[in-house]
Image (spheres, rainbow, N blue to C red):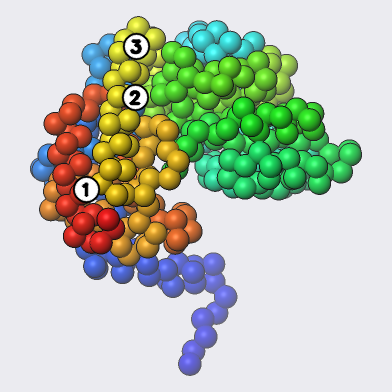
């Protein structure tokens, strides 16, 4: 038997899972869309019902949002070709920062190129010494873990607490040494599970310890809280949450991210976070589109009402059909299948035989026992879209023994 010589590419040649899935015709990723209009999309010339997008308010095709992007290109060109730190800031970025801070009731805001970079920035800038500990809900988004890893490489530590458990957070905080300072980190609405962080319960432990709290509201802005202000406002705790981050890539129909909090904290982050300082800034068209969507979100409040009506309808119907949905209370509705192969089969049958697009979450992204189909909903879904999808989910779910 010949042994391979050490080579960084050995793992590459040994990676078979994607090719196996392609051969079996169930590879679910990187599917190119011909168009994606919102509630429906076109894949390989075929119209599909879209149950797998984060376009929660349906604004990616809104005339004002399109027009803002086009007009920004006409006025400012296509890119700033530099980072915020140097030649990449425009008045547009600053104007949007003021609007976001004002909307969320915080002193200051920063606009980032992506939401992912927001979380890299928080971890890398705030955890960069030995006495700092990130105390992280186990189910947070990968970008929070990556940010924490950057902090760890500069001396910070990490401990995790049980998903959405105030008792577990309290235990984790009480085990810290006296000289250690804690940053508690959680998603506001969890990206796979769709449940809402119980900030009202977690806050007791945070305050008892004198810790700081960061909430990633990527899936909460425009979805929960008064006027779509997100999780902290949902609980009336906006003055107690130190930092709120989020993205423009979901309700705001663009690409980019934001962070709000105390002016002094954000000023520190903008001088110590490489993901903010050394990456090109959001293009004028992305910022202009997000700003237009932000205005539309506040003016066309019916969208949030319709979104809530739609996801409530789907949750009740899916539960009634016998699917296991967990504790979702948002526009993200997971359907637990708890088996990787069955999840892929469910996903591919829905798409091939019923033209319904969903997102499969399988290992290693989640534990195999937690594999699920993630469905998500929009304000622009009409009842006919929801009912068509429901019929398909019920029929395939029954056929495969999921219900
Ligand atoms: C909870 C959460 N945080 C952060 C991000 C990253 O945001 P973006 O897509 O803007 O990089 C996502 C997006 O997938 C997310 O779901």
Q: Residues within 10 Å of mark 1 (few under 14, many from 20)?
A: many
Q: Secondary structure at mark 2?
A: helix
Foreground tag (2 vs 3): 2
Residue located beneath label 3 in the image: 301
Query: Marks 3 and 1, Cα distance to the nearest angstrom?
Result: 30 Å
Judged left or right of residue 113, residue 309 is left
Is 155 above or below relative to 36? below
Picture residue at 41% right of the left edge, 21% below the top: 222
Residue located beneath label 1 in the image: 393
Q: Quadrant of residue 249?
A: top left
* First of labels 2, 3 by sequence position: 3
Judged left or right of residue 200, residue 392 is left
Foreground tag (3 vs 1): 1
Q: Secondary structure at mark 3?
A: loop
Residue located beneath label 2 in the image: 308
Query: Marks 2 and 3, Cα distance to the nearest angstrom?
Result: 11 Å
* First of labels 3, 1 by sequence position: 3
């Amino acid at each position: 038997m010949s042994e391979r010589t050490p080579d960084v590419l050995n793992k590459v040649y040994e990676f078979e899972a994607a090719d196996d899935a392609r051969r079996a015709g169930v590879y679910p990723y990187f599917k190119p869309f011909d168009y994606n209009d919102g509630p429906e999309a076109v894949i390989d010339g075929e119209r599909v019902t879209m149950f797998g997008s984060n376009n929660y308010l349906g604004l990616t095709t809104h005339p004002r949002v399109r027009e803002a992007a086009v007009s920004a290109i006409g006025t400012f060109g296509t890119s700033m070709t530099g980072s915020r730190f140097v030649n990449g800031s425009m008045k547009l970025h600053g104007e949007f920062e003021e609007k976001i801070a004002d909307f969320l009731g915080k002193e200051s805001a920063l606009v980032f190129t992506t939401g992912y970079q927001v979380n890299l920035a928080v971890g890398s800038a705030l955890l960069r010494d030995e006495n700092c500990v990130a105390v992280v809900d186990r189910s947070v988004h990968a970008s929070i873990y990556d940010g924490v890893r950057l902090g760890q490489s500069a001396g910070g530590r990490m401990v995790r607490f049980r998903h959405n458990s105030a008792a577990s957070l309290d235990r984790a905080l009480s085990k810290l040494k006296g000289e250690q300072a804690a940053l508690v980190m959680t998603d506001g609405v969890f990206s796979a599970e769709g449940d809402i962080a119980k900030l009202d319960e977690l806050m007791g432990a945070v305050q008892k310890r004198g810790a700081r709290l960061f909430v990633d509201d990527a899936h909460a802005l425009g979805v929960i809280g008064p006027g779509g202000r997100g999780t902290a406002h949902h609980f009336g705790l906006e003055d107690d949450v130190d930092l709120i981050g989020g993205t423009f890539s979901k309700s705001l129909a663009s690409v980019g991210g934001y962070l709000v909090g105390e002016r002094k904290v954000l000023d520190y982050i903008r001088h110590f976070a490489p993901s903010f300082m050394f990456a090109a800034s959001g293009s004028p068209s992305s910022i202009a589109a997000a700003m237009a969507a932000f205005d539309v979100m506040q003016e066309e409040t019916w969208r949030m009402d319709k979104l809530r009506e739609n996801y409530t309808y789907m949750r009740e119907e899916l539960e009634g059909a016998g699917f296991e949905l967990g504790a979702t209370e948002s526009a993200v509705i997971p359907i637990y299948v708890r088996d990787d192969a069955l999840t892929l089969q469910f996903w591919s049958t829905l798409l091939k035989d019923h033209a319904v697009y969903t997102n499969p979450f399988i290992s290693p992204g989640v534990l195999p026992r937690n594999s699920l189909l993630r469905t998500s909903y929009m304000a622009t879904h009409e009842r006919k879209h929801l009912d068509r999808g429901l019929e398909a989910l019920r029929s395939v779910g029954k056929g495969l023994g999921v219900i």
